[in-house]
């Protein structure tokens, strides 16, 4: 879908980005993460030609972006930035409708699209359609910014610290809402963030950058549990134990659970991908002495007790046990 091949950028003698490469399929999300000044935003801007690379190439569906007219290229990419960038003299409707109007969509189609997106993003049209940005909170403005980025159905979304200007509670809520949004399920997304938790939650792939280079590219689990360099190890150290508590799921220990149904007791059902920590909490809170869990995975049903799950949970905690 989109590929960066040995991207580099110099500003004078300063090497801002050095040999960055990655390849994403349709529907995958990559987080570029690192300290301020590590080259993540410069890398992002080279993907839509806001910055021209000193060397290297970017390909979309096999086509070099240098061979695509810049206006056409950017219409294939939604762009969400930290400071939102809404036009203050435009209403919510006008901000979201901007790109479809440039594409000369019929006004009826534009209206339907704007209303659809606002409803999905929790902004009822009867309350927000004709408001101006100054009349909304930061979180509401960012939702409008996301709607604008999605309005013309771009297959690729670029997000540069999209929640960076929001308070901590609003950030978490925005992340949860965005991951649930059906509009994002088939999009290819490149996310720039300095928030490790945000990168781990939202992405299938994480690239940890330092001094313009990718120190490690891998899945969230690989980054946390198999750091390849001292920089990555130190960068993830604070979050490693917290992530380890939340990472193990029922599906990870399913093969070791019992197929024998308990003779009696209360049965709680769990999806197979439920985190073990949530399973333990639910079993512990349930009333009665005989409480068991039940899960079905690939047509096989298994039962388990609090003690069963606690045993497997303890064994999974490599960092804590060491």
Image (spheres, grey):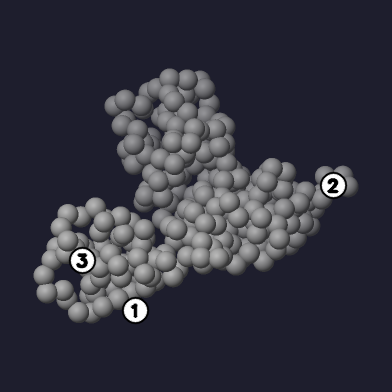
Quadrant for residue 254, please give it. bottom left
Q: CA distance from mark 1 to mark 2?
A: 53 Å
Indicate the position of residue 153 as horizontal and vertical percent values: 45, 48
Disc 2 is placed on an element classified as strand
Q: Which residue corresponds to mark 2? A: 14
In this view, 270 is above or below 201: below
Q: In the rendered view, does 232 fall on the left or right side of 83? A: right
Residue closest to the eye, 73 or 262:
262
Q: Secondary structure at mark 1?
A: helix
- Give the foreground label among 3 and 1: 3
Q: Nearer the N terminus, badge 3 or badge 1?
A: 1
**Residue found 70% across the figure and 57% down from its top:** 231
Tag 2 or tag 1, which sits nearer the N-term?
2
Q: Quadrant location of the N terminus? A: bottom right
Q: Which mark is residue 292?
A: 3
Residue at figure coordinates x 34%, y 36% from the top left:
122
Left or right placement of residue 210 versus residue 148 in this view: right
Q: SS at mark 3?
A: strand
> x%, y% of residue 194?
61, 45
Residue under label 1, please give it.
255
């Amino acid at each position: 879908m989109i590929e960066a091949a040995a991207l580099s950028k110099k500003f004078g003698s300063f090497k801002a980005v050095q040999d960055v490469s990655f390849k994403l399929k349709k529907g995958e999300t990559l987080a570029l993460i690192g300290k301020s000044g590590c080259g993540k935003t410069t890398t992002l801007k080279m993907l839509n030609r806001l910055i021209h690379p000193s060397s290297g190439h970017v390909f979309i569906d096999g086509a070099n972006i240098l061979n695509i007219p810049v206006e056409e290229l950017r219409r294939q990419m939604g762009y969400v930035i930290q400071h939102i960038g809404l036009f203050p003299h435009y209403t919510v409707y006008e901000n979201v409708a901007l790109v479809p109007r440039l594409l000369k969509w019929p006004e009826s189609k534009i209206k339907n699209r704007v209303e659809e997106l606002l409803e999905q993003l929790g902004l009822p049209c009867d309350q927000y359609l004709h408001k101006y940005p100054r009349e909304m909170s930061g979180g509401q403005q960012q939702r409008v910014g996301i709607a604008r980025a999605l309005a013309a159905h771009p297959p690729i979304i670029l997000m540069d610290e999209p929640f960076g200007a929001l308070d901590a509670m609003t950030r978490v809520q925005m992340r949860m809402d965005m991951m649930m949004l059906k509009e994002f399920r088939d999009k290819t997304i490149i996310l720039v963030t300095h928030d490790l938790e945000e990168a781990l939650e939202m992405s299938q792939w994480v690239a940890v950058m330092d001094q313009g280079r990718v120190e490690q590219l891998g899945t969230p689990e690989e980054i946390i549990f198999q750091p390849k360099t001292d920089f990555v190890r130190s960068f993830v150290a604070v979050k490693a134990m917290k992530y380890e508590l939340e990472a193990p799921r029922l599906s990870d220990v399913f093969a070791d659970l019992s197929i024998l149904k308990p003779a009696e007791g209360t049965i709680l059902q769990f999806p197979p991908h439920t985190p073990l920590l949530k399973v333990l909490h639910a079993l512990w809170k349930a009333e009665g002495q005989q409480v068991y869990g039940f899960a079905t995975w690939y047509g096989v049903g298994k039962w388990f007790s609090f003690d069963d799950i606690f045993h497997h949970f303890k064994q999974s905690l490599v960092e804590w046990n060491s």
